[in-house]
Amino acid sequence: MTIYHLTIFAPRKTNCMKKILFTLAIIPMLAFNSFGQDGDCAGVISGQDCLESNAITTAVPFLLIAPDTRSAAMGDAGVALSPDANAQHWNASKLAFSEDEMGVSVSYSPWLRQLVDDMSLSYLSWFMKLNKSSAIGASLRYFTLGDIIFTDNNGNTIRPFRPNEFAIDVSYSFKLSERFSGGITARWINSNLTGGVNVGGADSKAANAFAVDLSGYYVNDDMSLGDKDAEFAFGFNISNIGNKVSYTNTAQRDFLPINLRLGVAYTIELDQFNSITLAYDANKLLVPTPPIYDSPGDPGYTGDPNFIVAGQDPDVGVAAGMFGSFADAPGIPIRDDGGTIQRNPDNTAQIENGSVLREELREINHSIGLEYWYDNQLAVRGGYFYEHPTKGNRQYFSMGIGARWKMLGLDISYLIPTEQRNPLANTLRFGLSLDFGYSASDDSPNQN
Protein backbone atom coordinates (compact mmCIF):
# COMPACT_ATOMS: atom_id res chain seq x y z
CA MET A 1 0.00 0.00 0.00
CA THR A 2 1.36 3.41 -0.96
CA ILE A 3 0.25 6.48 0.97
CA TYR A 4 0.71 10.02 -0.32
CA HIS A 5 0.78 12.95 2.04
CA LEU A 6 1.44 16.65 2.28
CA THR A 7 4.85 17.67 3.56
CA ILE A 8 3.76 20.18 6.16
CA PHE A 9 6.01 19.36 9.09
CA ALA A 10 9.72 19.51 9.80
CA PRO A 11 11.82 16.39 9.10
CA ARG A 12 11.90 15.44 12.78
CA LYS A 13 8.48 13.96 13.56
CA THR A 14 7.22 12.83 16.93
CA ASN A 15 4.87 9.86 17.22
CA CYS A 16 1.86 12.19 17.27
CA MET A 17 3.10 13.86 14.09
CA LYS A 18 3.27 10.48 12.41
CA LYS A 19 -0.39 9.88 13.18
CA ILE A 20 -1.33 13.31 11.84
CA LEU A 21 0.61 12.66 8.66
CA PHE A 22 -1.05 9.26 8.39
CA THR A 23 -4.58 10.51 8.83
CA LEU A 24 -3.96 13.43 6.48
CA ALA A 25 -2.40 11.11 3.93
CA ILE A 26 -5.38 8.85 3.52
CA ILE A 27 -7.93 11.60 2.89
CA PRO A 28 -8.65 10.70 0.20
CA MET A 29 -5.43 10.10 -1.78
CA LEU A 30 -4.98 6.37 -1.36
CA ALA A 31 -3.05 4.00 -3.60
CA PHE A 32 -3.45 0.26 -3.37
CA ASN A 33 -1.13 -1.25 -5.93
CA SER A 34 2.06 -3.18 -6.47
CA PHE A 35 3.66 -0.65 -8.80
CA GLY A 36 6.92 0.97 -7.81
CA GLN A 37 7.66 4.52 -6.90
CA ASP A 38 9.68 6.82 -9.13
CA GLY A 39 12.80 5.04 -10.18
CA ASP A 40 11.62 1.58 -9.18
CA CYS A 41 11.55 0.22 -12.71
CA ALA A 42 14.63 -1.95 -12.83
CA GLY A 43 14.43 -4.59 -15.48
CA VAL A 44 11.82 -2.79 -17.55
CA ILE A 45 12.64 -2.98 -21.25
CA SER A 46 13.23 0.37 -22.93
CA GLY A 47 10.03 1.56 -24.58
CA GLN A 48 7.77 -0.46 -22.27
CA ASP A 49 5.26 1.54 -20.24
CA CYS A 50 6.64 1.48 -16.69
CA LEU A 51 3.75 2.21 -14.33
CA GLU A 52 5.28 4.51 -11.72
CA SER A 53 3.00 5.95 -9.06
CA ASN A 54 2.81 9.72 -9.43
CA ALA A 55 -0.36 10.80 -7.63
CA ILE A 56 -1.19 14.49 -7.31
CA THR A 57 -1.48 15.74 -3.73
CA THR A 58 -3.02 18.93 -2.38
CA ALA A 59 -3.93 20.55 0.90
CA VAL A 60 -7.42 20.05 2.42
CA PRO A 61 -8.36 17.06 0.23
CA PHE A 62 -11.53 16.57 2.32
CA LEU A 63 -13.12 19.10 -0.07
CA LEU A 64 -13.19 16.38 -2.73
CA ILE A 65 -15.03 13.76 -0.66
CA ALA A 66 -18.62 13.26 -1.82
CA PRO A 67 -20.63 14.64 1.14
CA ASP A 68 -24.08 13.35 0.15
CA THR A 69 -25.54 9.88 -0.14
CA ARG A 70 -27.24 10.26 -3.52
CA SER A 71 -24.09 10.89 -5.56
CA ALA A 72 -22.01 8.65 -3.31
CA ALA A 73 -24.32 5.79 -4.27
CA MET A 74 -23.82 6.66 -7.96
CA GLY A 75 -20.04 6.40 -8.07
CA ASP A 76 -19.55 10.07 -7.14
CA ALA A 77 -21.40 11.29 -10.24
CA GLY A 78 -23.36 14.46 -9.53
CA VAL A 79 -22.52 17.52 -11.59
CA ALA A 80 -25.41 17.05 -14.05
CA LEU A 81 -27.99 15.28 -11.87
CA SER A 82 -31.33 16.95 -11.21
CA PRO A 83 -31.10 19.71 -8.59
CA ASP A 84 -31.47 19.05 -4.88
CA ALA A 85 -30.14 20.64 -1.70
CA ASN A 86 -26.73 18.94 -2.18
CA ALA A 87 -26.14 20.75 -5.48
CA GLN A 88 -24.11 23.24 -3.45
CA HIS A 89 -21.18 20.79 -3.56
CA TRP A 90 -21.55 19.38 -7.08
CA ASN A 91 -22.86 22.29 -9.14
CA ALA A 92 -24.59 25.25 -7.52
CA SER A 93 -25.92 26.53 -10.86
CA LYS A 94 -28.48 23.68 -10.84
CA LEU A 95 -30.38 25.34 -7.99
CA ALA A 96 -31.90 27.89 -10.38
CA PHE A 97 -33.82 25.01 -12.00
CA SER A 98 -35.13 23.53 -8.76
CA GLU A 99 -38.91 23.08 -8.66
CA ASP A 100 -38.88 23.27 -4.86
CA GLU A 101 -39.02 26.65 -3.18
CA MET A 102 -36.53 25.64 -0.48
CA GLY A 103 -34.61 22.58 0.60
CA VAL A 104 -32.45 21.42 3.51
CA SER A 105 -30.19 18.37 3.62
CA VAL A 106 -27.98 16.87 6.29
CA SER A 107 -25.65 13.90 5.82
CA TYR A 108 -23.14 11.98 7.90
CA SER A 109 -20.31 9.77 6.67
CA PRO A 110 -18.19 7.65 9.01
CA TRP A 111 -14.82 7.65 7.23
CA LEU A 112 -12.13 4.99 6.91
CA ARG A 113 -13.63 2.83 9.65
CA GLN A 114 -11.36 -0.04 8.59
CA LEU A 115 -8.46 1.95 10.06
CA VAL A 116 -9.86 4.33 12.70
CA ASP A 117 -13.15 4.57 14.55
CA ASP A 118 -13.51 8.30 15.15
CA MET A 119 -13.10 9.96 11.75
CA SER A 120 -16.16 11.36 9.98
CA LEU A 121 -17.54 13.93 7.53
CA SER A 122 -20.72 15.88 8.29
CA TYR A 123 -22.52 18.08 5.79
CA LEU A 124 -25.39 20.54 6.14
CA SER A 125 -26.76 22.34 3.09
CA TRP A 126 -29.65 24.69 2.36
CA PHE A 127 -31.07 26.56 -0.61
CA MET A 128 -33.97 28.89 -1.38
CA LYS A 129 -35.45 30.07 -4.66
CA LEU A 130 -35.57 33.88 -4.88
CA ASN A 131 -37.84 33.72 -7.92
CA LYS A 132 -38.35 31.49 -10.94
CA SER A 133 -34.93 32.37 -12.31
CA SER A 134 -32.54 32.53 -9.36
CA ALA A 135 -31.64 30.87 -6.07
CA ILE A 136 -29.23 31.21 -3.17
CA GLY A 137 -27.62 28.46 -1.13
CA ALA A 138 -25.33 27.84 1.81
CA SER A 139 -23.57 24.85 3.35
CA LEU A 140 -21.29 23.76 6.16
CA ARG A 141 -18.87 20.85 5.72
CA TYR A 142 -17.07 19.56 8.83
CA PHE A 143 -14.38 16.89 8.85
CA THR A 144 -12.92 15.49 12.05
CA LEU A 145 -9.78 13.35 12.08
CA GLY A 146 -10.41 11.86 15.50
CA ASP A 147 -8.53 12.18 18.78
CA ILE A 148 -4.73 12.47 18.79
CA ILE A 149 -2.32 12.61 21.75
CA PHE A 150 0.65 14.89 21.08
CA THR A 151 3.92 13.57 22.51
CA ASP A 152 7.52 14.71 22.41
CA ASN A 153 10.50 12.68 21.17
CA ASN A 154 10.73 10.92 24.52
CA GLY A 155 7.09 9.83 24.45
CA ASN A 156 5.95 12.34 27.07
CA THR A 157 2.40 13.60 26.58
CA ILE A 158 2.12 17.23 25.51
CA ARG A 159 -1.64 17.52 25.06
CA PRO A 160 -4.62 15.81 23.47
CA PHE A 161 -6.14 17.35 20.38
CA ARG A 162 -8.86 16.65 17.84
CA PRO A 163 -7.71 17.82 14.37
CA ASN A 164 -10.54 19.13 12.25
CA GLU A 165 -11.28 20.93 9.03
CA PHE A 166 -14.36 22.82 7.88
CA ALA A 167 -15.65 24.83 4.93
CA ILE A 168 -18.49 27.34 4.82
CA ASP A 169 -20.09 28.05 1.42
CA VAL A 170 -22.56 30.56 0.05
CA SER A 171 -23.77 30.50 -3.55
CA TYR A 172 -25.91 32.34 -6.06
CA SER A 173 -27.33 30.77 -9.21
CA PHE A 174 -29.36 32.30 -12.00
CA LYS A 175 -30.91 31.32 -15.31
CA LEU A 176 -29.28 32.82 -18.39
CA SER A 177 -31.91 31.27 -20.65
CA GLU A 178 -34.75 28.78 -20.43
CA ARG A 179 -32.24 25.92 -20.59
CA PHE A 180 -28.96 27.23 -19.18
CA SER A 181 -27.94 28.59 -15.80
CA GLY A 182 -24.75 29.81 -14.19
CA GLY A 183 -23.59 29.83 -10.62
CA ILE A 184 -20.87 31.16 -8.34
CA THR A 185 -19.92 29.89 -4.91
CA ALA A 186 -17.71 31.57 -2.30
CA ARG A 187 -15.98 29.32 0.23
CA TRP A 188 -14.09 29.89 3.48
CA ILE A 189 -11.81 27.00 4.50
CA ASN A 190 -10.16 26.33 7.84
CA SER A 191 -7.83 23.39 8.48
CA ASN A 192 -6.53 22.98 12.03
CA LEU A 193 -4.36 19.85 12.23
CA THR A 194 -2.00 20.64 15.12
CA GLY A 195 -3.70 23.10 17.46
CA GLY A 196 -0.65 25.34 17.40
CA VAL A 197 1.78 22.74 18.78
CA ASN A 198 5.45 23.51 18.14
CA VAL A 199 6.82 21.07 15.56
CA GLY A 200 10.54 20.70 14.91
CA GLY A 201 11.22 24.14 16.39
CA ALA A 202 8.57 25.86 14.28
CA ASP A 203 5.19 27.06 15.50
CA SER A 204 2.34 25.44 13.60
CA LYS A 205 -0.93 27.16 12.77
CA ALA A 206 -4.31 26.55 11.25
CA ALA A 207 -4.42 26.95 7.47
CA ASN A 208 -7.04 29.35 6.11
CA ALA A 209 -8.12 29.97 2.55
CA PHE A 210 -10.77 31.67 0.48
CA ALA A 211 -11.95 30.00 -2.72
CA VAL A 212 -14.66 30.25 -5.37
CA ASP A 213 -16.48 27.82 -7.64
CA LEU A 214 -17.70 28.66 -11.15
CA SER A 215 -20.39 26.40 -12.53
CA GLY A 216 -22.89 25.98 -15.35
CA TYR A 217 -25.87 23.74 -16.08
CA TYR A 218 -27.77 23.01 -19.30
CA VAL A 219 -30.99 20.99 -19.38
CA ASN A 220 -33.28 20.03 -22.26
CA ASP A 221 -36.48 18.24 -21.24
CA ASP A 222 -37.99 18.41 -24.73
CA MET A 223 -36.44 15.15 -25.88
CA SER A 224 -37.58 11.58 -26.49
CA LEU A 225 -36.23 8.10 -26.88
CA GLY A 226 -38.61 6.17 -29.08
CA ASP A 227 -42.03 6.84 -27.61
CA LYS A 228 -40.60 7.72 -24.17
CA ASP A 229 -40.12 11.24 -22.87
CA ALA A 230 -36.50 12.00 -22.01
CA GLU A 231 -34.32 14.72 -20.56
CA PHE A 232 -30.67 15.54 -21.25
CA ALA A 233 -28.50 17.58 -18.89
CA PHE A 234 -24.89 18.79 -18.99
CA GLY A 235 -22.99 20.39 -16.14
CA PHE A 236 -19.55 21.74 -15.30
CA ASN A 237 -17.94 23.01 -12.14
CA ILE A 238 -14.49 24.48 -11.56
CA SER A 239 -14.18 24.35 -7.78
CA ASN A 240 -11.81 25.53 -5.04
CA ILE A 241 -10.09 28.29 -7.03
CA GLY A 242 -8.20 29.95 -4.22
CA ASN A 243 -4.95 30.80 -2.46
CA LYS A 244 -2.26 28.33 -1.45
CA VAL A 245 -2.03 27.39 2.22
CA SER A 246 0.66 26.52 4.74
CA TYR A 247 0.61 25.05 8.26
CA THR A 248 3.82 26.72 9.46
CA ASN A 249 5.60 29.95 8.65
CA THR A 250 8.52 28.01 7.20
CA ALA A 251 6.72 25.30 5.22
CA GLN A 252 6.12 25.38 1.50
CA ARG A 253 2.63 26.52 0.55
CA ASP A 254 0.36 23.89 -0.98
CA PHE A 255 -2.38 24.14 -3.58
CA LEU A 256 -6.03 23.76 -2.74
CA PRO A 257 -7.69 20.88 -4.64
CA ILE A 258 -8.71 23.05 -7.59
CA ASN A 259 -10.86 20.74 -9.61
CA LEU A 260 -12.60 20.56 -12.99
CA ARG A 261 -15.69 18.37 -13.21
CA LEU A 262 -17.67 17.78 -16.41
CA GLY A 263 -20.73 15.57 -16.57
CA VAL A 264 -23.87 14.52 -18.40
CA ALA A 265 -27.11 12.90 -17.29
CA TYR A 266 -29.84 11.32 -19.40
CA THR A 267 -33.24 10.56 -17.89
CA ILE A 268 -35.92 8.41 -19.49
CA GLU A 269 -39.47 8.35 -18.18
CA LEU A 270 -40.48 4.74 -18.77
CA ASP A 271 -44.10 5.41 -17.82
CA GLN A 272 -46.10 7.48 -15.36
CA PHE A 273 -44.50 5.80 -12.35
CA ASN A 274 -41.02 4.70 -13.44
CA SER A 275 -37.95 6.60 -14.58
CA ILE A 276 -34.25 5.85 -14.94
CA THR A 277 -31.24 8.19 -15.08
CA LEU A 278 -27.76 7.41 -16.39
CA ALA A 279 -25.02 9.84 -15.33
CA TYR A 280 -21.33 10.19 -16.15
CA ASP A 281 -18.73 12.57 -14.67
CA ALA A 282 -15.12 13.20 -15.67
CA ASN A 283 -12.96 14.81 -13.01
CA LYS A 284 -9.45 16.36 -13.14
CA LEU A 285 -7.36 18.24 -10.61
CA LEU A 286 -6.11 21.59 -11.94
CA VAL A 287 -2.88 21.61 -9.93
CA PRO A 288 0.69 20.73 -10.96
CA THR A 289 1.71 17.13 -11.45
CA PRO A 290 4.80 16.18 -9.38
CA PRO A 291 7.88 16.12 -11.63
CA ILE A 292 10.69 13.57 -11.53
CA TYR A 293 13.70 14.91 -9.63
CA ASP A 294 17.31 13.86 -9.98
CA SER A 295 18.20 10.93 -7.77
CA PRO A 296 21.55 10.50 -5.95
CA GLY A 297 21.46 6.82 -6.87
CA ASP A 298 21.28 7.51 -10.60
CA PRO A 299 24.57 7.23 -12.55
CA GLY A 300 23.71 10.53 -14.26
CA TYR A 301 23.13 12.38 -10.99
CA THR A 302 23.87 16.11 -11.37
CA GLY A 303 24.54 16.67 -7.67
CA ASP A 304 21.37 18.73 -7.26
CA PRO A 305 18.40 16.77 -5.81
CA ASN A 306 16.12 19.65 -6.83
CA PHE A 307 17.10 19.33 -10.48
CA ILE A 308 14.02 18.30 -12.53
CA VAL A 309 14.80 15.61 -15.07
CA ALA A 310 11.23 15.35 -16.37
CA GLY A 311 8.10 17.45 -15.95
CA GLN A 312 7.62 21.04 -14.85
CA ASP A 313 8.48 23.01 -11.71
CA PRO A 314 5.40 22.77 -9.42
CA ASP A 315 6.36 25.90 -7.47
CA VAL A 316 4.17 28.26 -9.52
CA GLY A 317 1.25 30.57 -8.92
CA VAL A 318 -2.37 29.47 -8.80
CA ALA A 319 -3.26 30.62 -12.33
CA ALA A 320 -0.08 29.13 -13.83
CA GLY A 321 -0.72 25.88 -12.00
CA MET A 322 -4.30 25.64 -13.28
CA PHE A 323 -3.52 26.26 -16.94
CA GLY A 324 -0.25 24.32 -16.84
CA SER A 325 -1.94 21.27 -15.31
CA PHE A 326 -3.09 20.12 -18.75
CA ALA A 327 0.44 19.56 -20.06
CA ASP A 328 2.89 19.31 -17.14
CA ALA A 329 3.03 15.54 -16.60
CA PRO A 330 6.59 14.16 -16.70
CA GLY A 331 5.66 11.14 -18.82
CA ILE A 332 7.51 7.82 -18.85
CA PRO A 333 11.33 8.03 -18.84
CA ILE A 334 13.22 5.68 -21.16
CA ARG A 335 15.34 3.28 -19.13
CA ASP A 336 18.02 0.76 -19.91
CA ASP A 337 17.80 -2.91 -18.91
CA GLY A 338 19.07 -2.02 -15.42
CA GLY A 339 16.32 0.55 -14.88
CA THR A 340 18.59 3.62 -15.27
CA ILE A 341 16.94 6.67 -16.84
CA GLN A 342 18.53 7.59 -20.17
CA ARG A 343 19.63 11.25 -20.34
CA ASN A 344 19.67 13.99 -22.93
CA PRO A 345 22.80 16.18 -23.34
CA ASP A 346 21.29 18.69 -20.89
CA ASN A 347 20.85 15.90 -18.31
CA THR A 348 17.05 15.85 -18.62
CA ALA A 349 15.40 12.47 -19.08
CA GLN A 350 14.57 10.93 -22.43
CA ILE A 351 10.79 10.51 -22.49
CA GLU A 352 8.79 7.90 -24.38
CA ASN A 353 6.81 9.32 -27.28
CA GLY A 354 3.18 9.90 -26.34
CA SER A 355 3.69 9.11 -22.67
CA VAL A 356 3.07 12.71 -21.52
CA LEU A 357 -0.39 12.66 -23.11
CA ARG A 358 -1.09 9.21 -21.68
CA GLU A 359 -0.22 10.40 -18.19
CA GLU A 360 -2.41 13.48 -18.55
CA LEU A 361 -5.33 11.26 -19.55
CA ARG A 362 -4.64 9.03 -16.53
CA GLU A 363 -5.25 12.04 -14.30
CA ILE A 364 -8.92 12.04 -15.28
CA ASN A 365 -11.14 10.16 -12.84
CA HIS A 366 -14.34 8.58 -14.15
CA SER A 367 -17.68 8.20 -12.40
CA ILE A 368 -20.73 6.45 -13.80
CA GLY A 369 -24.03 6.13 -12.00
CA LEU A 370 -27.53 4.76 -12.47
CA GLU A 371 -30.66 5.86 -10.62
CA TYR A 372 -34.13 4.32 -10.77
CA TRP A 373 -37.22 5.98 -9.30
CA TYR A 374 -40.62 4.44 -8.66
CA ASP A 375 -43.53 6.83 -8.22
CA ASN A 376 -41.21 9.52 -6.88
CA GLN A 377 -41.13 7.56 -3.62
CA LEU A 378 -38.50 4.86 -3.87
CA ALA A 379 -35.05 5.11 -5.49
CA VAL A 380 -32.45 2.44 -6.17
CA ARG A 381 -28.94 3.58 -7.16
CA GLY A 382 -25.65 2.11 -8.26
CA GLY A 383 -22.34 3.33 -9.63
CA TYR A 384 -18.64 2.84 -10.26
CA PHE A 385 -15.65 5.12 -9.65
CA TYR A 386 -12.32 4.66 -11.41
CA GLU A 387 -8.94 6.27 -10.75
CA HIS A 388 -5.85 5.05 -12.62
CA PRO A 389 -3.43 2.89 -10.54
CA THR A 390 -0.59 5.41 -10.98
CA LYS A 391 -2.77 8.28 -9.75
CA GLY A 392 -4.13 6.80 -6.54
CA ASN A 393 -5.93 3.63 -7.64
CA ARG A 394 -9.27 4.36 -5.95
CA GLN A 395 -11.63 1.96 -7.68
CA TYR A 396 -14.93 0.94 -6.19
CA PHE A 397 -18.56 0.11 -6.79
CA SER A 398 -21.31 1.84 -4.86
CA MET A 399 -24.98 1.29 -4.22
CA GLY A 400 -27.78 2.92 -2.29
CA ILE A 401 -31.47 3.45 -1.77
CA GLY A 402 -33.65 6.47 -1.20
CA ALA A 403 -37.18 6.99 0.07
CA ARG A 404 -39.47 10.01 -0.14
CA TRP A 405 -42.66 10.73 1.77
CA LYS A 406 -44.16 14.11 0.95
CA MET A 407 -41.41 16.59 1.78
CA LEU A 408 -39.21 14.19 3.80
CA GLY A 409 -36.39 12.16 2.22
CA LEU A 410 -34.02 9.51 3.56
CA ASP A 411 -30.98 8.15 1.69
CA ILE A 412 -28.34 5.51 2.41
CA SER A 413 -25.28 4.56 0.36
CA TYR A 414 -22.66 1.83 0.63
CA LEU A 415 -19.20 1.55 -0.92
CA ILE A 416 -17.76 -1.74 -2.25
CA PRO A 417 -14.02 -1.59 -3.14
CA THR A 418 -12.54 -3.69 -5.91
CA GLU A 419 -9.42 -4.38 -3.86
CA GLN A 420 -9.15 -6.34 -0.64
CA ARG A 421 -7.98 -4.59 2.56
CA ASN A 422 -9.14 -1.24 1.21
CA PRO A 423 -9.64 1.32 4.03
CA LEU A 424 -12.70 2.62 2.17
CA ALA A 425 -14.42 -0.76 2.42
CA ASN A 426 -17.90 -0.82 3.95
CA THR A 427 -18.19 2.97 3.96
CA LEU A 428 -21.76 3.95 4.83
CA ARG A 429 -23.33 7.36 4.31
CA PHE A 430 -26.63 8.56 5.71
CA GLY A 431 -28.66 11.52 4.49
CA LEU A 432 -31.88 13.27 5.49
CA SER A 433 -33.57 15.97 3.41
CA LEU A 434 -36.57 18.29 3.56
CA ASP A 435 -38.01 19.81 0.39
CA PHE A 436 -40.34 22.72 1.01
CA GLY A 437 -42.80 23.61 -1.70
CA TYR A 438 -43.42 19.95 -2.52
CA SER A 439 -46.69 19.40 -4.39
CA ALA A 440 -48.55 16.11 -4.72
CA SER A 441 -49.17 17.01 -8.35
CA ASP A 442 -45.47 16.89 -9.13
CA ASP A 443 -45.11 14.09 -11.65
CA SER A 444 -41.39 14.21 -12.33
CA PRO A 445 -39.90 11.06 -10.75
CA ASN A 446 -36.45 12.54 -11.03
CA GLN A 447 -37.04 15.44 -8.67
CA ASN A 448 -35.90 14.88 -5.10
Image (spheres, helix red, strand yellow):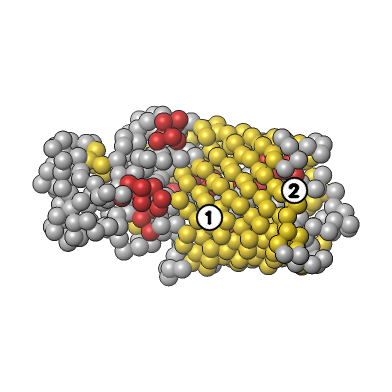
Q: Earlier in the sequence, mark 2 or mark 1?
A: 2
Image spot of residue 280 (x, y percent) = 57, 56
Amino acid at dot 2: Val
- Closer-to-camera residue (145/33): 33
Q: Which mark is residue 359?
A: none
The residue at which mark 1 appears reads as 119
Left or right: residue 253 versus residue 269 is left
Mark 2 Cα shell of 10 Å, populated few (<14), some (14-19), many (≥20): many
Task: Out of 174 and 85, give the one closest to the viewer.
Answer: 174
Image quadrant in which you'd find residue 212 = top right
Asked whether the viewer can see residue 298, the reply is yes
Q: Is residue 137 above or below residue 225?
A: above
Which residue, as the protein is rendered here, is positioned at the far left? 299
Residue at 88 percent of width and 58 percent of height: 440
Residue 405, image x, y percentages: 82, 62
Left or right relative to 305: residue 388: right
**Residue position marked by numbered label 2 in the rendering:** 104
